[in-house]
């Protein structure tokens, strides 16, 4: 039997940039933030390297930023949402700076901005080259610690609690070995992406789509789950003892002029796209995937473009290379694509409301429509802050209905020894290149794991991704079907309600 607790504010599940921005914006309403690990640990936000994209300079405009976002999204970006994101972007960056995030400045005190792939301007506000995530999250975490309205607890959410009308009333959580049913006026889901479901990923292990599964099981509308972005340049340490998760060689290195070369030392991106190294991520990821599949090797060569200044300009990447015995000043860095970002998620409106009353979703677990089929680099920290703030303001007005909560059983748990099989199957079959045959194999693996261990949250999310990828018989953005390489003339989003995938998943 779970204990019961009634919280007189809003329950926030997850403590990345999205969850903490929402918690801060909820004030003066109280927020209870639940995080499986201590603050700053186990969230992608603190690992971000490049920075936050926003039209901050006089020669840039939110409309131009929105146009780049729409172009990168391969026909599926919601233009109104993209414009909302980019118009509120500069204020969100200034808000982070006011909290103490030490963004790099030029000698006039203006934000120094990097150029990243598929941006038509240098518009990524950064911190000491590749330290943006850590520095931003430190500032936000300090603000949370100083806030009298926010309580943070270490714990993990398992199920969303609902009343007889389907309204979300709280969550069943695991906290210090106890199970507690916490009810609240509303719940903000901020549980991040799905990278931990893949064998090769840049995301922390704790980030594996659990919020998406919880929302789907509660009957929330899910959008575009098949669209997973693979970062082209994770550092491939397979010949150096391996690393899980894979460290990242930030896109900003390519912005600085680093080249992608094969084992023969020749650049290969010019053959794939006019923007070469700065082509959209999916194009670069596929080119690297091909190089590796054909045994030609893929390396990021920063010797000329960055050279001796590497340790000062990119201290995080330099440390990751050094730990593996690599010196990027003298040798090219071996790279491979890795699951990095989930464009799909729980469908939301512009105030982060989901299709279920009482439930909000923000950050990577949400699908606001701003990323379409392919996210523009450095738009996700921006989305986490902009929509986190919007969610906090909107959820702050929720009145606790005090309705009775229906009983909810905890989901099955996938034993740790079963997770590698799922992760391997996801990378192999729902990775950079997909086929109907591979996706069917993946679904069979998911079914077999579910038959042995029960329907764990990870399996529900994997099933959503696989089913939607199988249904999308075209190639677009982050979703590449070897058996359907053409892009359909009509661009359509995937929307999944509780039927039919979820009913099966809940059986
Ligand atoms: C290596 C790396 C580099 C990146 N670089 C950039 C960049 O330069 N610019 C950019 O814009 N984006 C970047 N991204 C993407 C960006 O960091 C993320 O998309 C963004 O931080 C997501 O924020 P979030 O708050 O939604 O999720 P996260 O920061 O991942 O936080 C999710 C939180 O939910 C918690 N959680 C998970 N499951 C549960 C559960 N069951 N119950 C309770 N809590 C749970 C997690 O532990 C965590 O606290 C990068 C990502 C990575 C991995």
Image (cartoon, rainbow, N blue to C red):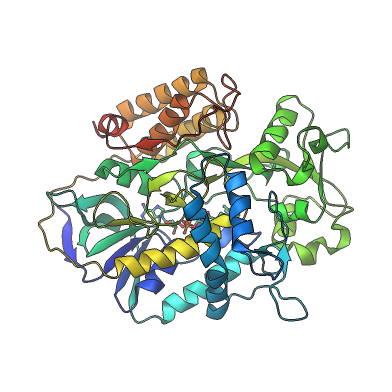
Give the residue drawn at x 70%, y 50%. 117
Residue 245 visible in rendering: no
Residue 431 visible in rendering: yes
Q: How many marks?
A: 0
Quadrant of the drawing holding the C terminus? top left
User: Which one is nearer the viewer's eye here, 190 or 309?
Assistant: 190
**Left or right position of 221 against 479:** left
**Left or right position of 85 against 121:** left
Image x and y of residue 203, in percent: 54, 49
Image x and y of residue 471, in percent: 44, 25
Image x and y of residue 46, in percent: 55, 62
Give the residue drawn at x 34%, y 72%. 26
Residue 218 picture quarter:
top left
Image x and y of residue 303, in percent: 87, 52
Residue 414 picture quarter:
top left
**Left or right position of 303 against 320:** right
Give the residue drawn at x 54%, y 56%. 380
Residue 503 picture quarter:
top left
Looking at the image, which residue sits at the far left?
A: 404
């Amino acid at each position: 039997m779970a204990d019961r607790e009634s919280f007189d504010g809003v329950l926030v599940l997850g403590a990345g940039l999205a969850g903490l921005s929402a918690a801060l914006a909820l004030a003066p309403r109280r927020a209870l933030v639940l995080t499986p690990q201590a603050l700053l640990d186990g969230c992608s936000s603190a690992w971000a390297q490049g920075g936050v994209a926003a039209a901050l300079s006089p020669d840039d405009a939110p409309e131009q930023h929105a146009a780049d976002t729409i172009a990168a999204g391969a026909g599926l970006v919601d233009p109104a949402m993209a414009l909302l994101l980019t118009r509120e972007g500069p204020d969100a960056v200034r808000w982070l700076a006011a909290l103490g995030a030490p963004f790099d400045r030029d000698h006039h005190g203006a934000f120094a901005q990097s150029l990243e792939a598929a941006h038509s301007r240098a518009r990524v506000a950064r911190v000491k080259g590749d330290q943006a995530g850590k520095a931003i999250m430190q500032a936000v975490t300090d603000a949370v610690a100083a806030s009298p309205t926010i309580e943070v607890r270490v714990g993990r959410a398992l199920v969303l609690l609902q009343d007889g009308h389907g309204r979300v009333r709280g969550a069943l959580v695991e906290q210090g070995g106890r199970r507690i049913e916490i009810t609240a006026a509303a719940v903000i889901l901020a549980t991040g992406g799905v990278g931990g479901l893949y064998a090769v990923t840049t995301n922390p292990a704790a980030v594996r789509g659990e919020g998406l599964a919880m929302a789907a099981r509660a009957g929330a509308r899910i959008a575009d789950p098949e669209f997973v972005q693979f970062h082209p340049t994770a550092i491939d340490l397979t010949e150096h003892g391996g690393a899980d998760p894979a460290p990242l060689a930030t896109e900003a290195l390519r912005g600085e002029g680093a080249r992608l070369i094969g084992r023969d030392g020749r650049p290969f991106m010019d053959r794939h796209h006019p923007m070469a190294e700065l082509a959209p991520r999916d194009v670069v990821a596929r080119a690297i995937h091909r190089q590796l599949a054909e045994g030609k090797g893929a390396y990021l060569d920063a010797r000329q473009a960055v050279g001796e200044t590497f340790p000062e300009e990119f201290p995080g990447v330099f440390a990751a290379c050094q730990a593996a015995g690599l010196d990027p000043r003298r040798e090219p860095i071996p790279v491979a694509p890795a699951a990095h970002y989930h464009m799909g998620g729980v469908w939301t409106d512009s105030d982060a409301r989901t299709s279920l009353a009482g439930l909000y979703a923000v950050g990577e677990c949400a699908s606001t429509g701003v990323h379409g089929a392919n996210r523009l680099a450095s738009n996700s920290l921006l989305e986490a802050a902009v929509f986190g703030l919007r969610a906090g303001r909107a959820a702050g007005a929720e009145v606790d209905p005090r309705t009775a909560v229906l009983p909810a059983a905890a989901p099955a748990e996938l034993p740790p020894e079963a997770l590698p099989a799922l992760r391997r199957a996801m990378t192999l079959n729902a990775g950079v290149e997909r086929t109907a045959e591979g996706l069917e194999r993946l679904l069979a693996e998911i079914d077999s794991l579910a038959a042995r261990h029960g329907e764990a949250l990870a399996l529900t999310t994997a099933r959503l991704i696989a089913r939607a990828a199988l249904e999308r018989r075209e190639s677009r953005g982050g979703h590449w079907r070897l058996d359907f390489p053409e892009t359909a003339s009509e661009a359509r989003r995937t929307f999944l309600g509780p039927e039919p995938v979820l009913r099966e998943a809940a059986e």
